Amino acid sequence: MNKVLILGAGQLARMMELAGTPLNLDVKAFDVRTDKVVSPIYPDRIYGDLKDGITNADVITAEFEHVAHDVLAECELSNKLFPTSNAIKIGGDRRLEKALLKSCNVSNANHYFINNKGDFDKALKCLSLPIIFKTALDGYDGKGQWRLKSTDDADVIWQDMADFLTASQTSVEQGIVAEQMVPFDREVSLVGVRRINGDTAVYPLTENHHTNGILSVSVAATVNSQLQQQAGAVFKALADKLNYVGVLAIEFFQVGEQLLVNEIAPRVHNSGHWTQQGADTCQFENHLRAICDLPLGSTALIRPTAMINIIGEDSVPNEVLAIPSATIHWYNKGKRVGRKMGHINVSGDTELQLAEHLQTLAKILDKKAYPDLIDFAKNYLEKLS
Amino acid sequence: MNKVLILGAGQLARMMELAGTPLNLDVKAFDVRTDKVVSPIYPDRIYGDLKDGITNADVITAEFEHVAHDVLAECELSNKLFPTSNAIKIGGDRRLEKALLKSCNVSNANHYFINNKGDFDKALKCLSLPIIFKTALDGYDGKGQWRLKSTDDADVIWQDMADFLTASQTSVEQGIVAEQMVPFDREVSLVGVRRINGDTAVYPLTENHHTNGILSVSVAATVNSQLQQQAGAVFKALADKLNYVGVLAIEFFQVGEQLLVNEIAPRVHNSGHWTQQGADTCQFENHLRAICDLPLGSTALIRPTAMINIIGEDSVPNEVLAIPSATIHWYNKGKRVGRKMGHINVSGDTELQLAEHLQTLAKILDKKAYPDLIDFAKNYLEKLS
């Protein structure tokens, strides 16, 4: 069982191929834009169409949750798809996600489903301001969201949403989920993995920072054991409920000592990229191990590590490489504003050393391209002092 | 400067491609058996012949020292070859190697060059028994060696060597180097790297164990600072003398507190594979950084790490993956007795934990395929207690 087909041929597939090759796993990817199976490292190398890909694979998985449902159905028929299409769809539809959380009795923000003006008016009555409205399908990196802070803006926002709903051409009916905005202290995420036999392992909780709605920095360092336990219990409940196989990421809002689930991602996750340098086994290898029914690798933290996303830039100054422990991971993608082009991992023997490396990094990188990094690094260092 | 051509398409080229891809380096390899340029990860993907490879590359390097001299000459003409053909040739000819050591005043075993019976007789007079005879060219992994322990065997051994010299079909004249065998305490090696601008960095000294003449285990853990300094000075002397660019490995015999050079390898080295999990930057990435004129990566030890070669076997029990920190690196090669097929890296937060992981590993692996590992692991643990 060593031939893997990934639905989606982006950077996550690429990093899975890089992680799987030393294990002699043969990793290919189905590029949904071209309907061709390719090597994620050599995307111009074509291995046929989806049918060929399914036939040639021992196991099939996905690098993103917005895979067309007919593709998922075709893969599931082969009995090779891990996780299930059900789990993947839940990650791509906030309504299903909320239903899953409810069925597992997992805390999350108060919310209301909206399909028409009547629902919208009810949502405004049920929830208190501010409210964030999110598209049920296809939203990511802060796209497809509206924020309502004052009822004065309700009509304008509703009109915009109504236009959006009318224009939607999704195969499943589009909808909106209204969520009461949570005054959270910080955002954290948990990346965990579950094997076919039910074994699970979770990485340390990761603290996440966003810039313009896109993840900019993730840090894995000191872990609060109470929070870690809380997050681990949520992971176990959701993963077991879904009979999940592979890596599953859960984003949380931390409010005081409580974690509320923001969203789940049925795949390897950007907030887990630090595991390439900071953990015993990286998330990409562990996902492959899980779906290929190999023993899970240890998820222990080796040393405090941070990941910095490279967004919209196709180069960084060479001095970055001179920072001890700094590692650059490029995705070999064409430059585009707001696009995730690569990431930098940086570690320290201690959290203080990590903070110092982050300071150095923030000084080297272009302030325009990494607008929050200097402040983040400064605050991080101050917090430790 | 991101297109790299490697002379030789074996596992070292493969691991360089895996290390270089995240840096967006385009790594190709010239397969000397087929005279074609290939992707080391996808060796059936062909990118033309040597001439094409040289034209398309920004820099050229080698994964082994026994590259045909006309190939080296053709590459050198392009001014893209790092290290120089001179440095590569020295690694492939023990006579040149000994001359280099002499010119740098670096300690090594007493030796004598042999081309005929007269030289052989003189060697027996100059050196005391036991003597090891090594072919000047093409010897590796204990092949092409004779050991003389008693003068009674001299005639038989000479006849065998004479036959060997007659049969040799090397483009450069073959020869024999007689070396007085050194009663060493252990074998260690130093992997270091030098950039075009003269910057150097060395990894911690690695202790090496051989089984049937082939490296079986390398351990990087506690470092004796006096020895590290001694080895580092030898590295600096040799690398500077050669105006070396890239990773250079030096094998030493340790006799008491003194290091004698056994041999040098002008390339990434099997005894440096532990750096993939145990060091800030692995040797493969650092070699690429050096030849692409990027800043060298830190060579600091992250945690005690051992490498175990997988020789002649194309599988290991899955339980190996359940050992925390155990990582398997397969080379995607056909199974053959005595062939290096892959390696396992295993680490520990402490040396004691590493020793425990090694014990577990030795129990899981087949005793016939890893005959010395149980004893090695036992002794290693006892040494720490």
Image: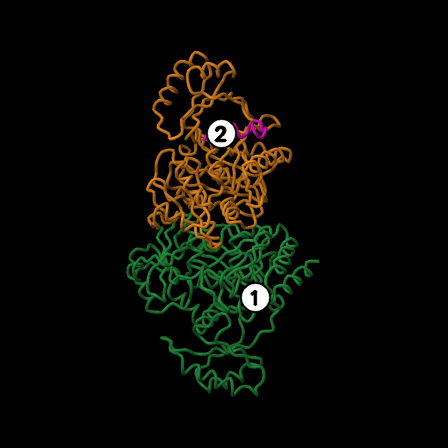
Chain colours: A orange, B green
For the residues beneath circles 2 and 1, the answer to whether they share a chain is no
Q: Mark 1 is on which residue type?
A: Ala
Marker disc for residue A37:
none
Q: Which residue is mark 2?
A: A96
Q: Is residue A22 above or below residue A162?
A: below
Disc 2 packing (10 Å; few <14; some 14–19; many ≥20): some
Q: Can see residue B238?
A: yes
Q: Is residue B303 above or below residue B108?
A: above
Image coordinates of residue A380 in percent, x first then y, are 55, 33
Q: Nearer the viewer, residue A381 or A30?
A: A30
Per the image, label 1 sits on a secondary structure element best described as loop
Query: Is residue B70 on the magenta stretch?
Result: no
Per the image, label 2 sits on a secondary structure element best described as helix
Residue extent of the magenta highlight: A93-107
| Image quarter in which the C terminus of chain B is found | bottom right
| Residue found farthest to the top | A152
Query: Is residue A97 on the magenta stretch?
Result: yes
Q: Is residue B243 above or below residue A372?
A: below
Q: Nearer the viewer, residue B383 or A87?
A: A87
Image coordinates of residue A111 in percent, x first then y, are 51, 22
Image coordinates of residue A198 in percent, x first then y, are 58, 43
User: Which secondary structure is most common in the magenta stretch?
Assistant: helix
Image coordinates of residue B98 in percent, x first then y, are 47, 72
| Residue found farthest to the front | A77
Rendered image quadrant of residue A206: top right
Q: Which residue is mark 1?
A: B369
